[in-house]
Image (tube, rainbow, N blue to C red):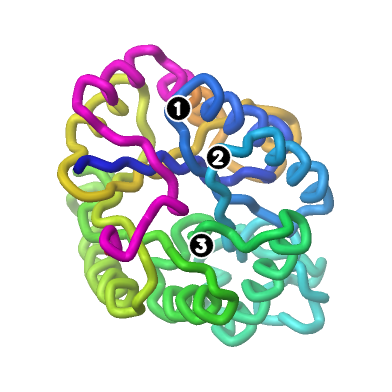
Amino acid sequence: MRGLIVNADDFGLSPGVSRGILRAHWEGIVTSTTFMVNFPWAAEMAGLLRRAPRLGVGLHLNLTTGAPVLPPAEVPSLVGPDGRFSRSLVRLLARMRPAEAEREWSAQVERFVALMGRPPTHLDTHRYLQAYPPLCRAMIRVARRYGVPAVRVLPPGVFPRGAFPPWSPAGPLLGAALRHTTRLVRASGLRAPDHALAGDFDLPGLLTRLDRVGDGVTELVTHPGEVDDLLRSLSSLQEQREVELAALTSPAARERVQARGIRLMHFGDLTDAARG
């Protein structure tokens, strides 16, 4: 069986991103999204999600954009003087206390349940923070604590060849971290896909990824959206979201899915037999 979860990250980041994700679901091949719940407009975004009952909805655990759910004084290592998260990963990882991150992520799960009336289908992390082993362990503990049955896995090879310059140490260092965190997820008893594919794409790139889907369950990580002023103030990933939206809603994408006999699914469809 070739199963494919097409997950759109960042629902709730801005109205434009959220509209784009819903379009990618209604008009395209997106089957799942992960909701960022730490923004003041999260209740409005939850209302939009109720218009898409067939869309799987997980939680996008966040430590780098906006403000925490908890009072800033309770998570001082995660925030700056303004009480907001730092957008710098280097600054976050240099200052962060993992116990505070775990408390904040627990509060984000509780906010999700309050907004949606049910637990998330799965957990993943904004900006791939789960590649850092202490945060991967925190994600696993939070999932177990709240009965969330599944998490994202980021195995080595998840990012396309050429994602890092050959002279950069980032590639080998990330590969070592992903091997370790993949072992943590596989040993956790939580459900996870067998494979994952990530990185920016256009339509030819998407079709190439669909051709790589093999036996088992694969998660395709995507970032579709419509660019709006709020997004411009919150994220450097802007026009690429519209490129991915166009690819995901292209008739060619659905035709390739059908031609390859791929079953579209979301994390809620994972069973113990399909456990990573």
Closer to the N terminus: mark 2 or mark 1? 2
SS assignment at label 3: strand
From the top left corner, tell me how far across and down residue 173 is, in percent: 26, 67
Q: Pointer 3: what residue?
A: 123
Which one is earlier in the sequence, the residue at label 3 or at label 2? 2
Q: Does residue 12 sit above or below 206 in this rendering?
A: below
Q: Is residue 41 left or right of residue 22?
A: right
Q: Which mark is residue 55?
A: 2
Residue 247 is inside the magenta segment: yes
Q: Is residue 269 magenta?
A: yes
Give the image location of residue 61, x and y in percent: 58, 62
Q: How far apart are the two marked residues, 2 and 1, measured between alpha carbons? A: 18 Å
User: Which image quadrant: the C terminus?
Assistant: bottom left
Q: Which residues are magenta?
A: 246-275
The residue type indicated by label 3 comes to: Leu
Of badges 2 and 1, nearer the viewer stands 2
Q: Is residue 192 left or right of residue 230?
A: left
Look at the image and tell me whether residue 162 can be seen.
no
Residue beneath disc 1: 244
Along the horizontal axis of the image, is 181 left or right of 58? Answer: left
